[in-house]
Amino acid sequence: MTKNGHVLKGFLGRLLQSQAGNVLAMVAAGVFPMLGLLGGGIDMSRIFLAKNRLQFACDSGALAGRKMMGGGAWSANSNKANTTAENIFNANFVSGAYGTSGLTKAFSEDAGNVTGTASVVVPMMIMKVFGFTNKTINVTCSAEMRIPNTDVMFVLDTTGSMGSKANSSDSMTKINGLKLAVKCFYEALAKLDINDANCGSTPSGGNSANVQLRFGFVPYSSNVNVGGLLSNDWIADNADYQSRESNPDGGWVYYSGDSTTTTYASNQNSCNPPANTKTTVDNSPSSGFRTTNGDWYSCTYSGWTGKYTVYQNRYTNYVEQPTYAYTYRKKTFDVSALKAGGYSWNSSVNLPIGYANAMTSVAWDGCIEERQTWKNNDGNATDDYSPVPASAYDMDIDMVPSTGNPATQWKPLLPNAVWGRYNSSGNNSYANVTSTSDLSRNYSYACPVASRKLQEYPTANNFKNYVNSLSASGNTYHDIGLVWGARLMSPTGLFASENAFTPEGGQIERHLIFMTDGDTVTSNTGYTSQGVAWWDRRQTTDSSAPSNGILDDTVNARTTALCTAIKNKNITLWVISYGSGVSSAAQTRLQNCASPGRFYSASDSASLIAQFKAIADEISQLRLTN
């Protein structure tokens, strides 16, 4: 016993004192922490991968759903936007991926903002040893159609043909289709409802207060109405018009006073009246008049009786004025009285165009005559504007007029001061014409609704009321509409201080939307921004009246040059051809006018509305928000 006990005691003692056996215990004790670290890393990686994929699927679904919604309603087309969002989600996160379960997802829309939520359960593979069984992952996402700072200028054809239908089966005239299309464009881009426009959905909420969205308008026909937007310094003080003046023709007519005739003596054997006392004073009571006083005697003889009768003609302050004839010719008039200071204007000016050059009030509706143009002398205008002549100031988008240089300034277009001359045979006359009668005006004229500079429309009524005021009248001169659309939105021209940046210094994207229903249509007897071409001949040779054909060629060449100039200013030029009456040549010109991929053709009002909404959707930029 003693020996064996000693042996046992020695073994146990050595074992107790030995450190070699601690390694096993330490290893055994460290297994679980190691499993926790390793398992946690593996399971966390699975959670991370699942969450990232779930977030990506949610973002993609929200983005696709918002894009499908466009400017319409979330529930439109049998909830197609929501279906699209879910389909895209499913394509990016397959149920059961990474061993997950319990997948849920939902998308909704409010004020144009699409919100998505998704959740999934990730089971623990290793950490369940430690009592961690499942991990639920939740993600949210949203997508909204958010535009950058944006300027949109509408250059709209409001010529007479817009008063007809695009085709016989259309439900409305082209001008009414245009009005509705522009309103639907506003709804899609501004996200505000216009109450008299049924655009298929009812937007609400508007855009972010941090976004500047401005709209401008240039309705055009043969003219544009921009005068009220211009500085007084940009309009010349004097301007030439095909007008008239009055000149005395040698006759006289009663003005005031008395003239009486009485019998002075009768049954006289001879004519022996008293001495005449009649005197006439010229330029009395004022210049050009004459005044007569005194008596004038005269006799008549009766063959029946053989006697004379003496008559007394008594004049008492008898005033006469000369009779006048009108000379119809080019005249220079002072029109500076239209200026009311700064950017304010009077609506009429007095000009000496009445009888005897009486001052006559002549109204101004705001349409303007263009500044110095290019004169074609070879009868071929097609090659005149490539490149644009330096002296063609009327084609210059950015030139600010110089007060001391009338060639750079515009002039008021005054139809009530203009006559188209014709001779006694009724034929137009380039030479001066004298007549004692008022000639007819002998020209056509149309002035569209006043243009508007770029401005914000935070409420829809102002926008709606302006669009509703558009009407159809006049011929088709595309060039005058395009040049003024560009001038009103250029960041480096007349209104650079308003257009270069936002008030906060932000960059601006610029879009010009040019809509027309067809070919150029000119008239050499139409009063346009270039005067009345038959008589003024500013763009053609003086030796003969221009044909409508050369005027058409001139407008087409100028339009092509302006399209290029606008695109060169980094303005996106959208062009829409409206209706079925556009020739193939005009269609080609319009297509070439547009920025790449920005040409549209609409056969009727329904397709025009769809095209405008599509453009609004393209201008909008889809951006994710979290």
Image (cartoon, helix red, strand yellow):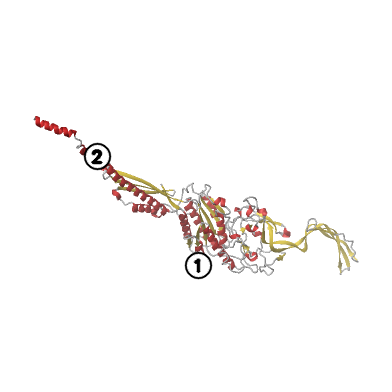
Along the line of sight, the residue nearer the viewer: 544 or 300: 544
Type of residue at label 2? Gly
Image point 26% across, 44% down: which residue?
126
Along the line of sight, the residue nearer the viewer: 310 or 608: 608
Gap in angstroms between the C-alphas marked 2 and 1:
86 Å
Residue 470 makes an appearance in the image: no
Residue 327 in the image: x percent, y percent?
Answer: 71, 64
Label 2 secondary element: helix
Residue 151 in the image: x percent, y percent?
Answer: 51, 53
To which residue does mark 1 refer?
584
Q: Earlier in the sequence, mark 2 or mark 1?
A: 2
> Residue 3, labelled with which disc?
none
Classed neighbour count for the residue bearing mark 2: other residues with Cα under 10 Å, few (<14), some (14–19), many (≥20): few
Horizontal side of 277 relative to 354 (left or right) equals right
Quarter of the picture containing the N terminus is top left
Residue 322 in the image: x percent, y percent?
Answer: 77, 61
> Residue 30, labelled with which disc?
2
Along the line of sight, the residue nearer the viewer: 221 or 537: 537
In the rendered picture of this protein, how many numbered marks are placed on residues? 2
Type of residue at label 1? Ser
Horizontal side of 45 relative to 443 (left or right) equals left
Residue 88 makes an appearance in the image: yes
Image point 49% across, 48% down: which residue?
211
Horizontal side of 88 relative to 409 (left or right) equals left
User: Residue 220, located in which quarter of the rendered image?
Assistant: bottom right
User: In front of the other: label 2 or label 1?
Assistant: 2
Label 1 secondary element: helix
Farthest residue in the top direction?
2
Horizontal side of 27 relative to 353 (left or right) equals left
Along the line of sight, the residue nearer the viewer: 573 or 311: 573
Residue 287 in the image: x percent, y percent?
Answer: 78, 57
